[in-house]
Image (cartoon, grey):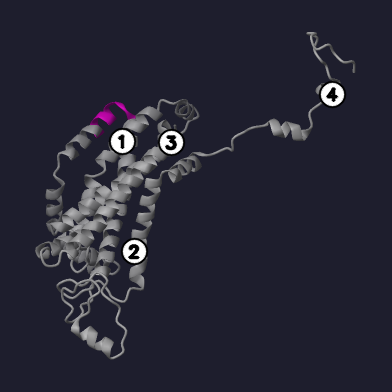
Amino acid sequence: MTKKNPLSLQLNINPEDFLPASNDEKESLVVMRESVGFWRDGFRRLRKNKVAMTCLFVIIVIMIFAFIVPSFYPYTYSQQVQGANNLAPFEYSAGEIARMEAGEKIFPHVFGTDKLGRDYAIRVMMGSRISLLVGMVAAVIILLIGSIYGSIAAFAGGWVDLAMMRIVDIIYTIPDILLIVLLSFALKQPLKTLAAMPGFGWLSVMGENLVSIFVVFALLYWVGMGRMVRSQILQLKENEYVTASKALGASSGRIIKKHLLTNCIGTLIVITTLQIPSSIFTESFLSFLGLGVAVPMPSLGSLASDAINGINTYPHLLFIPATVISLIILSFNLLGDGLRDAFDPKLKN
């Protein structure tokens, strides 16, 4: 090829520039981001939230402490150790010291004992288990009732929505504490009769107060969830895919289940996660007032209530369950905030 004058404006044409690109050259020019789904993208952003991940780790540790450790712990929540009343943490009774001097190995009372000589660590574990179970079961009940009620009200619209929302306004005015007290007295005899039947012995372990709490959760506490779901469905039902589903003859139930509730699942998860600490706090508060689980089954609220009289002499009996309650509620709240930040499309940037 002839050499071109440097001052010339003529293009330097090289025939090799017009040869077809090889497969390797084509692949080197393709710059595409890996396809990421909704859940994977949300959990990837959640992992970047150090506060939320720390709270998730704390929740896992508390669940191991409440559900796994009691299975091989040497004491039970109702076992009374003779002469071991109101022991300090890692302290032994006179009888246990004598047995240790005789060569027997005695597991220490990590958190001490209560006034009846029961190991306090296992009671805190079982109390945490009860509080967590109450919170999670209540959250599931609230999720089911609130999502169904709110989605039906929003999808139906018109006078149906108006009537259903007025029912919600009426439920907001009912005092929950008074209803729990009334239900505990009203359900006392029927529950005793039912607990005597085969297969219903677990009702006597829970007690009428705890059953009343679950009934009140099912009757009253779903209204916030219902309103939130209603507001989401009102926005989603105007989308084109809902109109297309109606045109194809899909039933209202299928549209609500397959299209509307599925597209607001991220919001439902966040609200449910934030509902768990609220339910735990309600149960702990009611147990503190004596309206919780039946004796001798402990909960964190009843443990704090029993320890309030001896706060000057044995303050650790109050501080330990109060600290666990605070950790559980704070961890779930911060985890819920992290889930909201991770799964809300408006907060991606």
Dot 1 falls on a residue whose secondary structure is helix
Q: Which mark is residue 65?
A: 2
Mark closer to the chain start, 1 or 4 = 4
Cα separation, mark 2 vs mark 1, equals 34 Å
Confirm whether the magenta stretch covers residue 128. Answer: no
Left or right of 34? Residue 157 is left
Mark closer to the chain start, 2 or 3 = 2
Dot 2 falls on a residue whose secondary structure is helix
Residues marked 4 and 2 touching at CB (< 8 Å): no
Q: Residue at x 69, y 30 (%)?
A: 29
Indicate the position of residue 223 as horizontal and vertical percent values.
Answer: 25, 40
Q: Residue at x 24, y 49 (%)?
A: 217
Mark closer to the chain start, 2 or 1 = 2
Mark closer to the chain start, 3 or 4 = 4
Indicate the position of residue 92 as horizontal and vertical percent values.
Answer: 22, 79
Q: Is residue 291 above or below residue 267?
A: below
Indicate the position of residue 260 as horizontal and vertical percent values.
Answer: 41, 35
Cα separation, mark 4 vs mark 2, equals 71 Å
Q: Which residue is mark 1?
A: 228
Cα separation, mark 3 vs mark 4, equals 53 Å
